[in-house]
Image (cartoon, helix red, strand yellow):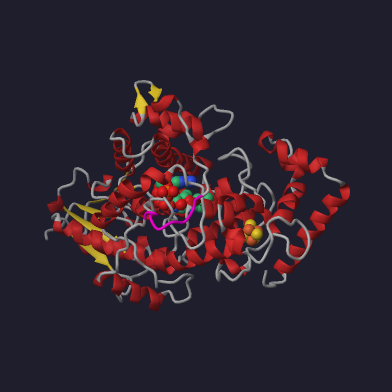
Amino acid sequence: MQRPSLLIPILGDQLSPAISSLRGVDPADAVVLMMEVREEATYVRHHKAKIAFLFSAMRHHAEALSRRGWTVDYVRLDDPVNTGTFTSELARAVARYRPSGIVVTEAGEWRVARMMEEWERELGLPVDIRQDDRFVASHAEFAAWAEGRRELRMEWFYREMRRKTGLLMNGSEPEGGQWNFDKENRKPAQGDLLMPRPLAFPPDEATRAVMALVEERFADHPGSLEDFDFAVTAKDAERQADQFMKHALAGFGDYQDAMLAGERYLWHSILSPYINVGLLDPLDLCRRAEAEYRAGRAPLNAVEGYVRQIIGWREYVRGIYWRAGPDYAQRNFLDARRSLPSFYWTGRTRMRCMAEALDQTLRTAHAHHIQRLMVTGNFALLIGADPAEVHRWYLEIYVDAFEWVELPNTLGMSQFADGGLLGSKPYAASGAYVDRMSDYCRGCRYDVKQRTGPDACPLNALYWDFLARNEEKLARNPRLAMPYRSWAGMQPQTKAALRVQAAGFLERLDAGEMI
Ligand SMILES: Cc1cc2nc3c(=O)[nH]c(=O)nc-3n(C[C@H](O)[C@H](O)[C@H](O)COP(=O)(O)OP(=O)(O)OC[C@H]3O[C@@H](n4cnc5c(N)ncnc54)[C@H](O)[C@@H]3O)c2cc1C
Ligand code: SF4
């Protein structure tokens, strides 16, 4: 090819055919650059399945772009001349092609955004950084919505997004006369043979090659590749979306918060990795879900719940991430300092709820929302784990983890380390919650009904200890008024026994005992 005018780097989470950096560009006059670089695979120790998913999806996307007429220069991880970082690989490509400019879609996180800001100076040519318009709200729109508000809450933002997109609206009124049907979405589930199952995609040759590379180069990273069955192309991701719409969406609402031993998916969509890298379009999924409702195939509480997760929570956490600034990851409102126990990387614990969530996570790089929030997240919160460490674990371990979405969910929603910027209360719970929403407790070595003694469920004493420890910071929170009233009403000896129980547990935890 003649010297191209433009060099277009496409990053691993920019695998959308209509990504803004390609728009309006003549494929005959540009080179697309895709890079598997060591720095991105190792800045935290990502789960092996996460790296395999990303590299394989990138390789398939490169082929799809080539078929559409783009010239794609693809730098593989094991290419001997690969220099290992985005910036150094761009510099090599600039020397190869001598383009007159670079066009790129903005980065999804502060770390890479700062890198991009330096490219113009470091590479000595103009860099056009385009907005990522795969989201419903732009940065400017979120900023305008947030400006001047005393507190930010997802619910109010979500209503704006409903109005903006027209999803589930009847003119200016919400479909069904209310905006949110969450109260109907808290049913525990029963396992049965008719439960929906997502599709599994056995690795093709390209994926198998990537898996071998990952095993060789990232042997010390957590997780396993044995159960790898993610889709790695837009076509297969679409098939997975069809499967969800047809078989699981109708139950999504009722069982959104349910957990069952041995059941990885329940009625969840398992589409977040595909949405986050660009293989699926989030707004399109919402419109398809709405069509299922309008056709009478899925109830309103399910479809509203699904739409809310995407145009509500997903957009809202992104807004919070960029608004909070690059130092968000350092916040530690509750001054929590404990190291995350080593069983987060092995799954070896007698607490059945934790063992189930961790085992599944280590095998598949996925767990559903309630496992993340109310099992692994709740436990970390109750023991006072350092939120920066908790954040690193979630970023490493989940296939859909990109900092803009993972960090606010972990540090804000789950660990309350931002003091209430994202959500109005910490999601702290005792064993009773797990017992109500799952069947885990039935097969557990601990007794969920006991609060003290060697067989007591650890979460029970830890819960009260958490409230007592953080009383100064949390007691005035109106959403915690009830538990603090219960705590105040307890006999001094009951309180003391709970705190002694929690202290004993934490001591054993810190000593690395099997618990
Ligand atoms: C501590 C913690 C860490 C998390 N880390 C991530 C992460 O790294 N990446 C990620 O995509 N999600 C994260 N989430 C949100 C949520 O758990 C996942 O999006 C969800 O489990 C993905 O599975 P699914 O596609 O089956 O989702 P479903 O339950 O089917 O939900 C539908 C879709 O809604 C979106 N969604 C739902 N909840 C959220 C949320 N709280 N924030 C943003 N989007 C949401 C996702 O795109 C998801 O695909 C985290 C939640 C918690 C509590
Ligand atoms: S008894 Fe406690 S530790 Fe065991 S599964 Fe239930 S909540 Fe988890």
Quarter occupied by residue 461: bottom right
Residue 174 vs residue 247, the one in the foreground: 247
Residue 209 at least partly seen: yes
Task: Name the dominant secondary structure of the magenta segment.
Answer: loop
Residue interval drawn in magenta: 189-196
Residue 404 at least partly seen: no
Q: Position of residue 135 (x, y in %)?
A: 36, 41
- Above or below for 149 versus 101: above
**Does residue 190 belong to the magenta stretch?**
yes
In this rendering, position of residue 95 left or right of residue 253: left
**Does residue 155 belong to the magenta stretch?**
no
Residue drawn at 51 percent across, 57 percent down: 260
Q: Position of residue 205 (x, y in %)?
A: 24, 72
- Above or below for 258 versus 352: above
Q: Quick one: quadrant of the C terminus?
A: bottom right
Q: Quick one: quadrant of the N terminus?
A: bottom left
Q: Position of residue 471 (x, y in %)?
A: 76, 43
Residue drawn at 32 percent across, 46 percent down: 245
